Structure formats: structure tokens, C-alpha cells
Image: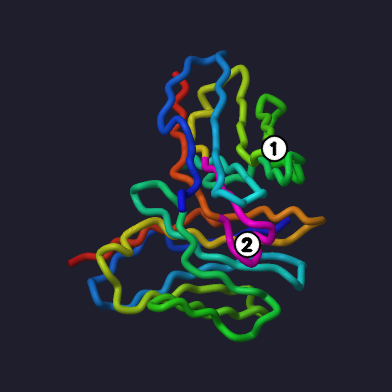
Amino acid sequence: AQTVTQSQPEMSVQEAETVTLSCTYDTSESNYYLFWYKQPPSRQMILVIRQEAYKQQNATENRFSVNFQKAAKSFSLKISDSQLGDTAMYFCAFMKTQGGSEKLVFGKGMKLTVNP
Amino acid sequence: KAGVTQTPRYLIKTRGQQVTLSCSPISGHRSVSWYQQTPGQGLQFLFEYFSETQRNKGNFPGRFSGRQFSNSRSEMNVSTLELGDSALYLCASSLRGASYYGYTFGSGTRLTVV
């Protein structure tokens, strides 16, 4: 079974700074997908970024980028120029497509606070 | 376009009762999944439906059931509620190929069992 580990339960950062959230996972699969989701106090999970395991190039979405190290099974998220609106729970998630089914396995999450 | 809509937003039930939660996916999305979120266990997968068929089920007791209708709307039911069923229940929808598009989540139903 796949597992996802987020070892830092909580972090804080000053506005405009850069912060990196760590995530490791365990799988024997070679083809899979990785995601970072953000959950603000509104409770809605919002997709931040996704990475395909077969792509060596790290995904980037505006201020968000990942450092994907497949051999090390590591998938960290870097947030540049942090904004107050980035304050939220962040979840790392793994997806393996299995017989057409696509379920997410989530880490425990990390609470990020951006301070003014 | 409208997002994933979950109703009700909040629910309080008594132990032993049953409850039905509803999820309306984004128009055109045929895949619907349910997740349970608790402080202790985090986010856990409940079910996945595609075109009215259950494609996958998580490790939950038989008291948890679900279904999907022809218009892709989905319901989940929990019978004989226990205190431990108190949680945020999240519904997510996707076009076929959630690995590519990612799931869009609703804001959840907060269930409290007393």
C-alpha cells in the first residue's frame, strides 16, 4: 500500500518570503501522479500543482513549484513570494491509476501560516 | 461554472440514526469520489463512482454506502451512526482522467454525531 508522509506539522513564514514544504512517499509503482492540495479555513480542497512521475521536469504554477526526486521518493513544494492568502493546510497526495479507478492517498497535512 | 456542491453544510445526528449526504458534481464530470476527514485519521478514501458504477471502495464498514445517479449526482449514506463517524465528508469530481485534471472538491458536509 502506498503511504505519504509530511513530517512537518506546522510552519510559519513572513509575507514575501519563500517556504518549502516537504513530502515523501512510499510506493513500488513506476507510474503514478503526485499532487499538492491546499485547504483554507473555507474547508474546500484546492489543487495547487500536479506532477506526473514519468516526467523528469519539475512542475511549476506561478509562485508554486515542486522539487520531484523520484529515486528518493520526495516531492516538496516551494512557495515563492508568500502571500497572506497562502495561509492554509497543505496536503501532499499520491494517485495510482488502478483498473480505471483513481483514488488519492493523502499525507496528514501541514499547517502553513503566512504572517504580515 | 458552478463548482462541486455538497448539502447540507452542517449536520447534527444522534448515535444510532442514519444520515444521507448529497453531492452534485461539476456539470459534465462523471467521476465522483468521497473522502472522510478527521483530526486523527486525516483524509481517508471512501468510494469512487463513475457512470453510476462503484469503481473502488475504501476500508470502511458496511454501514457506509453510496450511489451515483444517471445525472452524476451522488449520495452517501451512513447507517447506525457512531460517535467516531463525526467528521468532515468531502466530495470530489473530475472529468474522466483525474490523474490529468485533478479532482475538484466541494466544501464538505460537517457531520457531528452526539
Q: Quadrant of residue B85?
A: top right
Mark number, residue A94: 2
Query: Which residue was labeled with disc 1?
Result: B70
Q: In this view, does A15 lie to the left or right of B62?
A: left
Dot 1, crowdedness within 10 Å: few (<14), some or many (≥20)?
A: few
Q: Distance between the residues labelled 1 and 2?
A: 29 Å
Q: Does the rendering let one see residue B40?
A: no
Camera-side residue of A93 and A8: A93
Residue at 52% of width from left, 15% of height from top?
B15
Q: Which residue lies furthest to the left in this view?
A: A116
Camera-side residue of B92 and B35: B92
Dot 2, crowdedness within 10 Å: few (<14), some or many (≥20)?
A: many
Camera-side residue of B81 and B91: B91
Is B89 located above or below residue A20 in the figure?
A: above
Q: Position of residue A27 (x, y in %)?
A: 72, 65
Q: Where is residue A110 in the image (x, y as percent from the top left)?
A: 42, 59
Is A62 located above or below residue B78 in the figure?
A: below
- Per the rendered image, the range of residues in magenta is B90-103
Is B23 located above or below residue A98 in the figure?
A: above
